[in-house]
Amino acid sequence: MRRSYRVAILGATGAVGTELLQLLESRQFPISELRLLASPRSSGSTLPFMGEQVPVQVVEESSFQGIDLVLASAGGSTSKVWAPKAVAAGAVVVDNSSAFRMDPQVPLVVPEVNPQAAAAHQGIIANPNCTTILMTVVVWPLHQVQPVRRIVAATYQSASGAGARAMEEVKTQARAILADEPPKAEIFPYPLAFNLFPHNSKLNPQGYCEEEMKMVNETRKIFGTEEIRITATCVRVPVLRAHSEAINLEFEAPFSVKQAEELLSQAPGVKLVQDWEANYFPMPIEASGLDEVLVGRIRQDISHPCGLELWLSGDQIRKGAALNAVQIAELLISQKLVGQKHKPPGEQQPAHSSL
Ligand code: A2P
């Protein structure tokens, strides 16, 4: 008989949390009990799951008792408080925040890229940053054939990256501007509707923001190499959902466009979208709601003999967050890495990649 699991979603009312709920339902995740957790703001609310309204509970010390698996998407500071408590209560946590991603004890997993890394978990597995997930799913199949030396990325990031309330804020700003009223910015530092600005995360002394450094550091950790040189410019754009990225890749040797197209048309989690005659390529509006990362506009870099240029759009809430987390959870189940008190690495069962 198929085993089922007691699952908690921390941050269930958020943009990613509600997507997690839908994915668990549509993918028929084996659940015997579901606990929806959020802040006191959501006290008394319910969310639909499998035809029923499930009450949302305020997270507290006892919330993780008897839980096998926690899918957390409530921000880094919330995860720092609750993930260790959930692990102490015997649960495995797939954490969508940045709190543990660069912790050497915590695997950082994109199932299409490094599923084997999950086996080393000690209770927490980190879900990478959305821009990193979208980029690594596309670059990895190429890197397997011809190592990438350098990545230059520019991102066009939707409001969804800052959560459900940020998406609402952009709509409200757009309505205000169309009514000739001044737009208000509360979640974002500046109006995003009819505007764009460099990503508003904290800047380091070199002038890079946190989002850009996540792409640099997380990609290296996921690919398992410090050798790749990566630089990025991350920009918020007035798109509601789904991020886009312009990626320049420099390989060790020339990489033909034809071979890249062949590889990406077969790569897991990727869909090639390009019609040169129609000038039709990936767009966030078409990537929204899809599992796959759309990639196209693959062309030789005219400034470098070993360079390729490509363009991608991927649903930030889905593959960039909730879907990747659910895929990690499915991976853990298939490798029997959940539902048993976790053991330190070396004492675990051998892992078998399922993707
Ligand atoms: P709530 O809706 O009660 O504020 P988003 O990224 O879309 O903004 O969603 C964030 C999610 O994290 C929401 O479900 C939110 O719950 C939850 N959350 C935020 N802060 C806390 C907290 N301190 N404790 C528990 N849940 C939190």
Image (cartoon, rainbow, N blue to C red):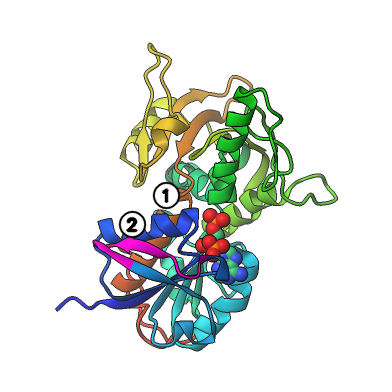
Query: Which dot marks residue 254?
Result: none
Q: Is residue 284 left or right of residue 273?
A: right
Residue found 35% across the figure and 36% down from its top: 271
- Label 1 – label 2 distance at C-alpha: 9 Å
Query: Which of the two residues, 209 or 227, is positioned nearer the viewer here?
Result: 209
Which residue corresponds to mark 2?
23
Q: Which residue of the protein is positioned furthest toward the right in this rendering? A: 205
Residue found 55% across the figure and 43% down from its top: 168
Residue found 74% across the figure and 43% down from its top: 189
Task: Confirm or reject: label 1 Cβ below 8 Å from ligand 1.
Answer: no
Q: What percent of the width, then of the height, locates residue 132?
A: 55, 49
Q: What percent of the width, then of the height, locates residue 275?
A: 37, 19
Tag 1–tag 2 contact (CB < 8 Å): yes
For marks 1 and 2 on the same chain, the one whose residue lies earlier in the sequence: 2
Query: Which of the two residues, 194 or 324, is positioned nearer the viewer here?
Result: 194
Q: Quadrant of residue 167?
A: top right
Which residue corresponds to mark 1?
318
Mark 1 Cα within 10 Å, few/some/many (few <14, many 20+)? many
Instruction: From this view, report whether residue 232 is shown above or below residue 179.
Output: below
Q: Is residue 354 left or right of residue 315?
A: left
- From which residue to which does the magenta span run? 42-53
Mark 2 Cα within 10 Å, few/some/many (few <14, many 20+)? some
Q: Is residue 107 left or right of residue 329?
A: right
Ligand 1: image quarter: bottom right
Q: Amino acid at mark 2?
A: Leu
Instruction: From this view, report whether residue 153 is shown above or below residue 212.
Output: above
Q: What percent of the width, then of the height, locates residue 269?
A: 36, 46
